[in-house]
Amino acid sequence: MASISGICSSSYALKLRNRNHSPALTNPFRNGPELAAFPSRPKLGSDRALSLVSVAREVSPVTNDGADAAVPAAKGFKKKTALEKDPRELWKRYVEWLYQHKEVGMYLDVSRVGFTDEYVAEMEPRFQAAFKAMEELEKGAIANPDEGRMVGHYWLRDSNRAPTTFLKSQIDNTLVAICNFADDVLTGKIKPPSSPEGRFTQILSVGIGGSALGPQFVAEALAPDNPLLKIRFVDNTDPAGIDHQIAQLGPELASTLVIVISKSGGTPETRNGLLEVQKAFREAGLDFPKQGVAITQENSLLDNTARIEGWLARFPMFDWVGGRTSEMSAVGLLPAALQGIDIREMLAGAALMDEATRTTVLRSNPAALLALCWYWATDGVGSKDMVILPYKDSLLLFSRYLQQLVMESLGKEFDLDGNRVNQGISVYGNKGSTDQHAYIQQLREGVHNFFVTFIEVLRDRPPGHDWELEPGVTCGDYLFGMLQGTRSALYANERESITVTVQEVTPKSVGALIALYERAVGIYASLVNINAYHQPGVEAGKKAAGEVLALQKRVLAVLNEASCKQPIEPLTLDEVADRCHAPEDIEMIYKIIAHMAANDRALIAEGSCGSPRSFKVFLGECNVDELYA
Ligand SMILES: O=P(O)(O)OC[C@H]1O[C@H](O)[C@H](O)[C@@H](O)[C@@H]1O
């Protein structure tokens, strides 16, 4: 566990601990606006390792002024050739292109992607433009023009790069506060008010999207087998899913630290998760604020709720850190530190990778090499899917994490010049060799619409635990063999692949992996001239969900009025739609009623939901108050 000596007197955590925990009379988060009116985002070493080391090229930092080339349209830019099949030539290509980062213990093999030297030369000016854009971004340019925001996740791991001393101190102070708080919880200095154990034993993290995926990935990858605090997640507004988490906590709810994470502080799913968890606390006779922690932007709805109710602690999210790149902010660091994961090492790994991916020499820049492969494989228009296959159980959630990072960043309708481009790269995958027994059949022989990224981990298990399950062969050798075999078999059938190899799954290598992909996405976004840092498409679904719930309220009012009559007046679907003055919404009204009927909130008097034209519906209970509301 990372710990920091010398607690800074202005430490955020200290200030919070000394706050007056008076019970709240109002809960703005609870009493907040309806879903439809929720505030939208502001507009705007083994032997093998040694042999790899001996053939790997060294990283040579070279400066380059960078060409400010205009980015031509992606389509029709390259001519594909058949993949090289001669094993000696392939070995030459492997050695020539192998990238190694010694300190992180990472290798990148792009030899099984078929780009040619001519192609690389043709792409060079675009890469120089992308490097320039990344440099500007790191200096604090408004890299998210739509939202008028800086994009500063790189400063989180090297605060000296923050464009102002104020931002630097915000980053440093938050890190100190996180470490202090985690230390205090782990050592039992901060205790749950009514736990017999006398210390926190569980974390319940409530958040969604970027406020869940990083912490989930890192917990799966790095949490010790038996952490002092075990983490669970509420990352949806599925009541049964939430009940399941709470049921599994059982009496340990009394020693559960609830961390509510939301950058905007107004995401409906997260708000619902919080309200459900608070209800469970009430029913168990527990005092939620003494076990609640908020991670959110200052003055958000969630922040105000936590402040007014006097929650145990609040940690800031910064405007200039996007949700999907927030793993190295309090969002990822606090849950990780509480599980005993060395967050300083994670930050160090990310900082090392940031440094390595700043070089403007394409061949020596692993993020640029990834972006090059993506561009080649997908024709720069997302024509192929990215299949992520880590051969290591603990990296299972990497593909899920990357789904948001890549697809929310690159999946854009318009480019920066306003042209409709419908960009993106689809990402999926679970883990090898498990997937070999599921969908690799299609990858090998079926529709050719993907390229693979293998994630290889050289260290099979901690030293001293290995054994041979047959002469000369360990369990890990099988995993290794499966990866290599699949890579060869796919390539033999013209299926391209990248291999990212790490020595071990450690906080440092995980931090580096995250940083590697963050930068690759940034570079690729520049190559295809899109804004990687906004997500305008997400708002459409949220708005539509709000409209559905508003319509449901009207349906309820109409049904209530008919159900309060004497005798009750069951209504047909057409009658409900007419009385809602929404005949064009009849399909949605049908779905609303079917959902309410399945949950015993509406009763079908005649017919059944399977015959929408003929059923009649009413409410089991008449709410007279609502009639006159
Ligand atoms: O952290 P929050 O503000 O609750 O946002 C959670 C998620 O919400 C949206 O759907 C965004 O598209 C995601 O990028 C974000 O991570």
Image: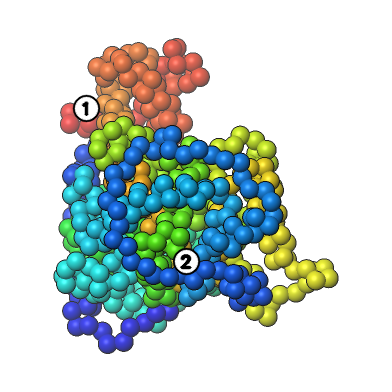
Question: Residue 585: percent from the left, percent from the top?
Answer: 32, 19
Q: Residue shown at 27%/51% (left/top)? A: 68
The image shows residue 413 at horizontal and vertical percentages of 33, 35
The structure residue drawn at horizontal position 26% and vertical position 84%, both measured from the top left corner, is 7
Report the residue marked by disc 1: 627
User: Looking at the image, can residue 618 be seen?
Assistant: no
User: SS for tag 2?
Assistant: helix
Of residue 548 and residue 366, the one placed in the foreground of this image is 366
Disc 2 under 8 Å from ligand 1? The reply is no
Name the quadrant of the C terminus. Answer: top left
Pick whichever, 82 or 247, lies toward us: 82
Residue 285 or residue 264, whichever sits in front: 264
Determine the residue located farthest toward the bottom in the rendered image.
6
Q: State the image coordinates of residue 55 (x, y, percent, origin top left).
A: 59, 69
**Residue 285: % across, % down:** 35, 62
- Above or below, 516 against 193 in this view is above
Using the rendered view, name the quadrant where residue 304 is placed.
bottom left
Tags 2 and 1 touching, CB below 8 Å: no
Can residue 43 be seen here? The reply is yes
Asked whether mark 1 and ligand 1 are closer than 8 Å, the reply comes as: no
Q: Is residue 401 left or right of residue 86?
A: left
Residue 242, placed above or below residue 394: above
Image point (42%, 75%), residue name: 345
Q: Amino acid at mark 2?
A: Val
| As drawn, 428 above or below 172 | above
**Residue at mark 2:** 510
* Circle nearer the N terminus (2, 1): 2
